Amino acid sequence: MIDRDVIGLLKQKVGVPFPHRFEGDRCVELDLASRDCIFQGLIRHHSQAEKAQILYLIAGLSHLRRLNLRSNLLGPLPDFFSNLSQLDYLDVSSNLLDKVPMCIEDMPNLESLNLSANNIEDLPPFLGRLRRLKRLRLHKTLFRTYPDELGGLEKLELLNLYQTRLKQMPRAIFNYANLTVLAWGVTPLTHLPPDIARLRRLEQLNLGCNRLSRLPDALCGMTQLEGLWLHQNKLKELPANFGDLQNLEHVTLYQNELTRLPASFCRLRNLTKLNLAWNFFEELPSAVLAMPKLEWLGFYHNPVRASLPRLTHIKDVILDK
């Protein structure tokens, strides 16, 4: 059956329009999720028999490169999905998966894989053989260990581990020399290994909602950082050389235990957004006045004892809430 006939049948079975794209007579992109749908998945409320028929048809589109099946409550993917060996993008998030589908092992061209919001309890070592993978989303899953074999994902640029059950940062992560975005918010992290500094290209680091009481000095060597989220931790102070992170544009420190900022903080001349709310500042840190690009400041819920200076150079200031 040719691809155009397959898409015709899919239109009948899905029942609503869905994005797809052809190159010549080959379908190369298919999207069964939509922001206009309340839960995004276009076949979420189809019967399991209907979903099985739809998946069988999709598996026949062997030239697909992008496939989005997000939020359709599909359950396990069929083994015959291994026919989709040309995929470079696959989103199967929110689909009641209890394990990583084995068919993914036969998709060596994958660059982006989203397995998030599933009941996955184990990560198979074969994921480490997806050597082209650049974006891996594993947030809101149930696995407790991160196989050393995944250290082979040398091209990885984005890794989302928010709300998994890991208890510490796996060593494999520090092999990702090309990583630019790391999101971590799992079983509360109490210690940040100095090896984090090996991620020299990291631009976005989210360590919110943990129990960090201090940061390693090595963090200050991550000079490519542009965004740093440290909210809802137990930080009492920042490293003395925090100002070495001069590419920072966004820093979130709300709900910690800070009473002051290090003197070097004034060197963060590129900051545009800074959240210092819910800390123990008794006065506005003077460094805030020396930030020429600052556009947004959160400073509410601090036990301020003195009147605050005028902050007319900052576009949006939230002082109480």
Image (cartoon, grey):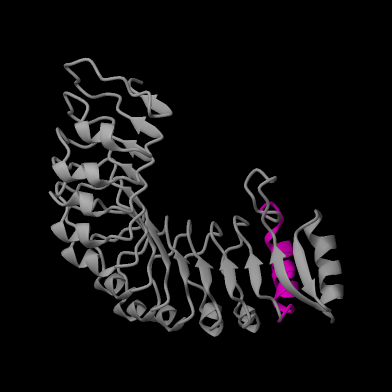
Task: From this view, report whether residue 189 is shown above or below residue 282.
Answer: below
- Quarter of the image with the C terminus is top left
Task: From this view, report whether residue 41 is shown above or below residue 69.
Answer: above
To which quarter of the image does residue 271 belong? top left
Q: Is residue 156 magenta?
A: no
The boundaries of the magenta stretch are: 44-62
**Residue 312 appears anywhere in the view:** yes
Identify the main secondary structure in magenta: helix
- Quarter of the image with the N terminus is bottom right
Task: From this view, report whether residue 180 is shown above or below residue 264.
Answer: below
- Look at 35% across and 46% down and name the residue there: 270
Where residue 42 appears, x then y in whole percent? Answer: 70, 54
Where residue 284 appears, x then y in whole percent? Answer: 22, 27
Is 45 on the left-hand or right-hand side of 263?
right
- Look at 86% across and 68% down and name the residue there: 8
- Look at 29% across and 52% down and name the residue there: 246
Where residue 145 appears, x then y in whole percent? Answer: 30, 69
